Image: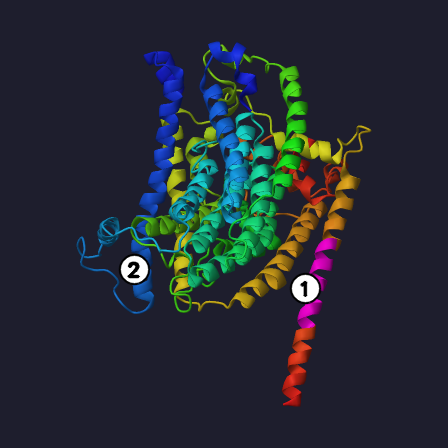
Amino acid sequence: MSQYLISHWGWYPPLVYTLMAMLAASLVLLVIAGGSVVFIWMERKVAGRIQDRLGPTRVGGKFGWLQTIADGIKLLSKEDLRPEGADAMLFRIAPYVAFCASYGSFIALPFATGWVGLDINVAVFFVVAVLGLEVFGVILAGYASASKWSLFGAMREAAQVISYEVPLGLCIVIPVMIAGTMDLTKIGNLQSGWFTNWYLFHDPFTFITFFVYYTCALASVNRAPFDLAEAESELVAGFHTEYSGLRWSFFFMAEYGSMFLVSALGSILFLGGWNGPVPVAAWIFGEHASQLSGFAFVLANVLGLMAFILKAVLGVTVMMWIRWTLPRLRIDQVITTCWKYCTPIAAVMFVGVISWQLMGLPNGGDVLPHHEQGSRRLPGSLRERPFETGDALPSANSVGFESEHGEQERGQVDG
Amino acid sequence: MGNRNGGRWMGEINGHTVLFLFFGILTCLFSLAVVFSANVVRMAFYLILALAATSGLHFLAGADFVGTMQLVLYVGGTLVLLVFGVMLTAQNPFISLRTAGGDWIVAALVGGILLVILVPVAFQIGLPPQDAGDIEGLTQREAVASSEPVSVPTATRIGLGLLGVPGDDVSGYLLPFEIISIHLLVVLVGAAYLARAKRKVVVRQESQNIAGS
């Protein structure tokens, strides 16, 4: 599009790039802001239904569609309070730090083939790295509020998030290892075709890994039953006790943004991303399904986008379901869950998937006949190898198993 | 940071230059802020911003992996510093740190020597090669980011360099890497042991107290 503007309209290139960047940035902002509006409404409805209530029913008609908007207006009109002993600068800036971290990680998240803010080839790594910075906002908020409740919440959050980074990272490495790339777009495209190609069904180990990932993701975005940083029954409201109005709502936008993000990341890594459960595109377009252009490409991508958003929203809904079902864990239980359950399980799954690949056992993709798609035969991916024959792997492929950190590069060695 | 953009480059200011200057100036400003602020938590906060701006410079140079590593390791490492800062200053004994005069002199000396080494090196490297992308008004970074020239996966090269390319006689850095990781593991186990031993004593005393009463 930017090429079109430059070549046909003769626009000044830097201006075009700036405009495009702003357009992409505001689209992502729209996803977060609009998303959190919808999610907050959804959370109310889900909570209501689970507790045998109706939830909001009045504002905006039968289903209370506009409840969140009304709340937003209320929040806008609230006074921006600041406690007397607070560190003014840090207190003001903390909500933005949390929000920026959540927002920043959306940059590298692809929504469909090629529909991504910045297509970097270490996207998985980038998303996790930037998302991990959200905890800064929480710690700063807790410290700057000059309140014991806030500080308690912040310190819990710090302990929790730092701990859960370990199993989360281990779980994320597994699909990366199978795909042989850290590029989220490629990982998504590698799982096209039947749903058995999804890494969730790759082998029994990845199936378990997904649930460990989901648990860790839940903890790392600070949702119930791991929402100890807020813990409204014991810490008033935890790290955001002293916040009001718009600054408070920034924390919530960050939280809902992160929830969507980890669900979306999980759906790309394990649930095939923008690929539907059945290879519709391959039926319609046959051989050319991976090299679409023009209108067909946009159409396929819109369908993919819908599938992707559906999966991510489903993940968020399950998070809400869990929140209103399970009681909150104690901090020692949270840490125990991390170090005594999630981390060892993730490590065993990691070794298990390596062994599965090494022994050349059949994976989920071999169960159903799959359509040959160019996107599945990306150069430098594990898929390049004829797994269907069940042969032992060529000897060159076993290079790189000595080190965990070399795993991602193993695929490229062959290519 | 902005040295290489002076003089000869003033003629061609493109998006890349602007972004480079932006991130460079941000890094400098936040680094100065770290030095001149007295509160530990604020220092850590400015340090995070300075390091994040540095990772922006890495991304601008097309080094995705290094930039992300910067975010994970340095910024994540500073997180721990921040946590300790919060823990220490919450009770107000260290709320502001004053630097003694002698420390200033030593720090200025070390920093000055480093600067004296770095500046000539920066000028010796010279200008980056002008890619074909620059001719059509595309900046280098945008040429890398656009889909047509396939961007080289930097992580692959780093990983291969670490492992040593199979077939070649290059051994890579696998052994030092493993030694370092074992070392870190031992340190972690040691730290956990020390932390645990202390708690055990407390528990025993409590149980004795309970038994005595």
Q: Is residue B101 above or below residue A114?
A: below
Tell which tag, 2 or 1, sits nearer the viewer.
1
Q: Is residue A261 above or below residue A112?
A: below
A38 vs B199, nearest the viewer: B199
Question: According to the image, label 1 marks what residue?
Answer: B195
A192 vs A40, nearest the viewer: A40
Dominant secondary structure (helix, strand or loop) of the stretch shown in magenta: helix
2 and 1 marks in contact (CB < 8 Å):
no
Q: Give the position of the N terminus of chain A as an image quadrant.
A: top left
**Chain ID, mark 1:** B
| Numbered label attached to residue A287 | none
Q: How many labels were placed on the picture?
A: 2
**Image spot of residue A186 (x, y percent):** 53, 35
Say which residue appears at 47% left-offset and 43% top-offset.
A273
**Amino acid tagged 2:** Lys
Say which residue appears at 21% left-offset and 60% top-offset.
A57
Say which residue appears at 41% left-offset and 39% top-offset.
A304
What colouring style does the render use? rainbow
Q: Is residue A52 above or below residue A219?
A: below
**Residues drawn in magenta:** B187-200
Label 2 crowd bin: few (<14), some (14–19), many (20+), radius 10 Å: some
Say which residue appears at 51% left-offset and 14% top-offset.
B133
Distance (Cα) linking label 2 and label 1: 46 Å
A330 vs A381, nearest the viewer: A330
**Chain ID, mark 2:** A
Question: According to the image, label 2 marks what residue?
Answer: A45
**Image spot of residue B160 (x, y percent):** 71, 32
**Image spot of residue A144 (x, y percent):** 43, 52
**Amino acid tagged 1:** Ala
Q: Is residue A205 left or right of residue A68?
A: right
